[in-house]
Image (cartoon, rainbow, N blue to C red):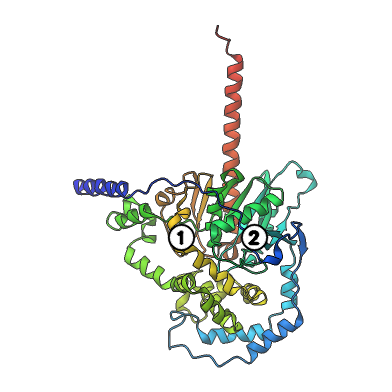
Amino acid sequence: MWKTTTVIFLVACGIALLFRPSPLEVPDLPETFWGPEKNKGASKEIRPFSIKVPKSVIDDLNERITKRRELVEPLEDAAWTYGINTTYLKDVLEYWSTKYNWSEREALLNKYPQYMTNIQGLDIHFYHVKPHIPPDRKNIKVFPLLLIHGWPGSVVEFQKIIPMLTTPRPDKDFVFEVIVPSLPGYGFSQAAVRIGMGTPQMAVIFKNLMLRLGFNKFYTQGGDWGSAIAASLSSLFPDNILGTHLNMCAVSGTSSMIWTFIGAYIPSLVVESEHADRMYPLKHHFARLLEETGYMHIQGSKPDTIGAVVAASPVALAGYILEKFSTWTNPEYRFRPDGGLLEKYTLDELLDNVMIYWITNSMTTSMRLYAEQFRIDHMASRIDELPVEVPVACAVFPYELMYQSESLIRGKYTNLIQFNHLPRGGHFAAFEEPALLADDVFKFVSTLEDIKKKNSAKNMSNAEKKIKEPTKI
């Protein structure tokens, strides 16, 4: 048996080496002007911002919900396996039109300081929350932390975790100053008017945002598209990144694909035995991923078609978005009549996120990011395969859409400091389990700080040793 395993292992290594792509050079991405002509010469000032939606917009919304077309009944016992359950969707719509209080929710979303600034022709919206440091802890260090959301999320996802990150902890000598931007084309951030803005180009914009705020070095944290943008920031601008924390670590490329398939025969070559069931049998996990990524194929090819259809009605918008917050939070929720939506969220919180898309009419522009990532020229550049050499932490939540083992992740993230399997949670980690995610971020930065202290002490010791050594003639 061991001979067979050895032969397969050697063959696998040979195949992996044979198909190993040539090393990639880090490109120097241009600072493209993405906005309309009228934005040329726009001021670079940072302007205070608050959400103010006219009553007429809310009245129109409620009228559209009330005058909606009758929904088709779901199949018997289908729950959410065919998509959102329209019986439950009716309850959501009833709550939205009769109990959801936008005035109160708007005030809540305005709780933290918000700003706008024009970068590369686009008005970029962001929260900027500074920590409140008690007088007796004035020596505490403050690290800037860029939090990046994904689709179909928004800055709403971070409402609960912001105070957890900006509040000093008794056992830590640091805290975070948090910057939470809306992605270009999402929410209150302006969308590009021309083709080509993928995650690397968004990374350029966010790097420039942080520089404008005075942060030459900063931490990043992201999930979903946020993880891809954070990875691009780290690979393209490593001198600006102190460390990157991700709650959706993913590696693409020929090597990881080959090793994933090899693991189907000998899992121990790829993944630890205690986590093997998260990757294998491959057929089961591939089928599940295929079931959950149908949206991606249409958004990656015809975003304006599906965007126009979904954005035309609040019923369509809520149905399309809320389905993701069910099955991506926990795949078992699709077997429940209510989709398990209220296990981790309140309807108010979920509708806050839907409202961001509705009041800004940003569903179409948010979907275009998929098309940009799947453009032939973007994929041919292999820019998403660039190695990340800055310190990285991966928070692995059990119900994330896909799982890749630590050995695969290290293929891209060469300085992986932390790879933690969290006890609960799914795709929307900051929204679902803010305390778990915040703890993991603090742990990561604490580990890095300890490493820095040890290296500093070691360097000082070596320097003192050299001083004490007699000079040789």
Q: In this view, does 69 lie above or below 184?
A: below
Q: Distance between the residues labelled 2 and 1?
A: 37 Å
Q: In this view, does 22 lie above or below 399?
A: above
Where is residue 393 shown, x and y percent of the image?
A: 52, 50
Instruction: Describe residue 323's horizontal placement relative to residue 182 as left or right.
Output: left
| Residue found at x 60% / y 40% | 449
| Residue found at x 66% / y 58% | 120
Residue type for callout 1:
Asp
Where is residue 306 shown, x and y percent of the image?
A: 52, 78
Q: Which mark is residue 309?
A: none
Q: Which of 244 and 56 is in front in this view?
A: 56
Classify mark 1: helix, strand or loop: helix
Q: Which of 38 and 105 is in front in this view?
A: 38
Residue extending furthest right?
135
Instruction: Describe residue 355's horizontal placement relative to residue 335 as left or right.
Output: right
Picture quarter containing residue 470? top right
